[in-house]
Image (tube, grey):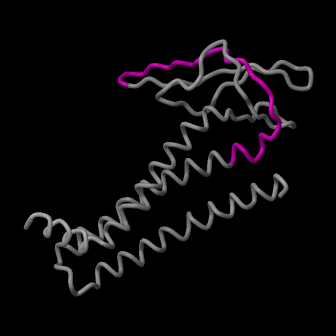
Amino acid sequence: MKKSTQKETVNGKWRFLAVFWPLLCMVFMGIILFDPDRKIDERIADAMFTLIPLVFFVIGMSIRRSLLKERRYATVLTTATVVSEGLRIRPGKRSFFPEFEFRAGGNLYHVKAAKGSGVSCVTKGKQEELYYAPENPGVFYVPKLQKHERRVSALLCGIGILWPVIGLFAPQIRMLFSFLQES
């Protein structure tokens, strides 16, 4: 499979999940709200289990989308030197915006990560893989930095997927816990 076809497949899967899952959660909410076996307070609580986690899902999917956008244009691999971890300190918060240097087409480029992270994923003076856009080397991504963002995205999407399922099966879960309490 060609690289562009792989990217189109990944983007297609992202779009499908970004649209399909929230719609499915709305179906879950309808099932929950119109379930005659649930008390009204259980209906409301269980419906919230399908609605509130969608916020996590949307945030996780938007992170994933920005990662896919970065990878769409930056296709040429090179090795870059970390020239700075890019520590920025604001009251109550510290962020890292690493800076890199690399050669492309005989020119030396100095680039800074546009998005910061609460943890430093790179070390000054080390060599890291970096992908850049051949027509504009200022457009780049570093797989090591994306690894952290992919994990955060997976966590948020996981919450957004797991909790609505818990809300849908809440009566069975309550029954299980009441059975365990009786024992």
- Left or right position of 112 against 181: right
- Left or right position of 116 against 174: right
Number of numbered tags placed on the structure image: 0
> Which residue corresponds to the image point at 42% horizontal and 71% vertical from the top-left?
25
- Range of residues picked out in magenta: 69-92
**Residue lying at the far left of the rendered structure:** 182
| Image coordinates for residue 41, horizontal then vertical, percent | 17, 73
Q: Quadrant of residue 107?
A: top right
For the C terminus, the image quarter is: bottom left
> Which residue corresponds to the image point at 77% horizontal and 56% vertical from the top-left?
6
| Image coordinates for residue 95, horizontal then vertical, percent | 49, 25
**Residue lying at the far front of the rendered structure:** 183
**Residue lying at the far right of the rendered structure:** 106
**Residue lying at the far top of the rendered structure:** 125
Task: Judge whether 139 appears above or below 4 on screen.
Answer: above
Q: Quadrant of residue 141?
A: top right
- Left or right position of 34 against 149: left
| Image coordinates for residue 178, horizontal then vertical, percent | 13, 68
- Left or right position of 140 against 104: left
> Which residue corresponds to the image point at 37% horizontal and 66% vertical from the top-left?
164
Whether residue 76 appears in magenta in the rendering, the answer is yes
| Image coordinates for residue 13, horizontal then vertical, percent | 64, 63
Q: Quadrant of residue 40?
A: bottom left
Whether residue 154 appears in magenta in the rendering, the answer is no
For the N terminus, the image quarter is: bottom right
